[in-house]
Image (cartoon, rainbow, N blue to C red):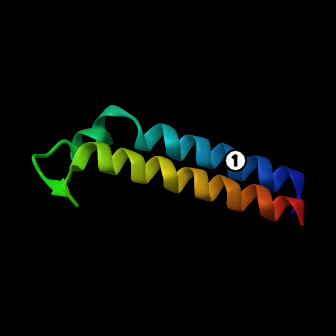
Amino acid sequence: MDNGLLQQRLIGLFALALLLFNFPLLALWDRELTVLGLPLFPAALFFVWALLIVILAWLMERAAD
């Protein structure tokens, strides 16, 4: 993968993470609901965090090829 394209995708992923972990979007998850017995807010935070790690790992593995 082109180094410039990889940099652009990593910057885009960083910007996405900033948006997802910023107040207006975090307030969407602050509800009195549970998911598999866990409160929605921590479950959503963990899911988004894990998804960002998976995307980052996929981008870095693709860059190694």
Q: Residue at 90% across / 66% down in the picture?
A: 65
Which residue occupies the extreme top position in the image? 23
Q: Quadrant of residue 14?
A: top right
Q: Quadrant of residue 19?
A: top left
Task: Describe residue 7's horizontal placement relative to residue 20 as left or right.
Answer: right
Task: Describe residue 55's horizontal placement relative to residue 16 as left or right.
Answer: right
Which residue occupies the extreme front position in the image? 37
Q: How many marks?
A: 1
Q: In x, y percent, where is residue 63?
A: 84, 59
Q: In x, y percent, where is residue 52?
A: 55, 51
Which residue occupies the extreme left position in the image? 32
Q: Residue at 80% across / 64% down in the picture?
A: 62
Residue 57 versus residue 37: which sits nearer the camera? 37
User: What amino acid type is highlighted by mark number 1?
Assistant: Leu
Q: Quadrant of residue 60?
A: bottom right
Q: Quadrant of the N terminus?
A: bottom right
Is residue 14 positioned above or below 5 on the image?
above
Is residue 65 positioned above or below 37 on the image?
below
**Helix, strand or loop under label 1:** helix
Q: Residue at 56% across / 41% down in the picture?
A: 15
Task: Describe residue 50's horizontal placement relative to residue 24 as left or right.
Answer: right
Task: Describe residue 37's horizontal placement relative to residue 13 as left or right.
Answer: left
Residue 8 versus residue 30: which sits nearer the camera? 30
**Tag 1: Cα neighbours inside 10 Å, few (<14), some, or many (≥20)?**
some
Q: In x, y percent, where is residue 24?
A: 29, 37
Residue 26 versus residue 48: which sits nearer the camera? 48
What residue does disc 1 label? 10
Q: Residue at 25% across / 44% down in the picture?
A: 41
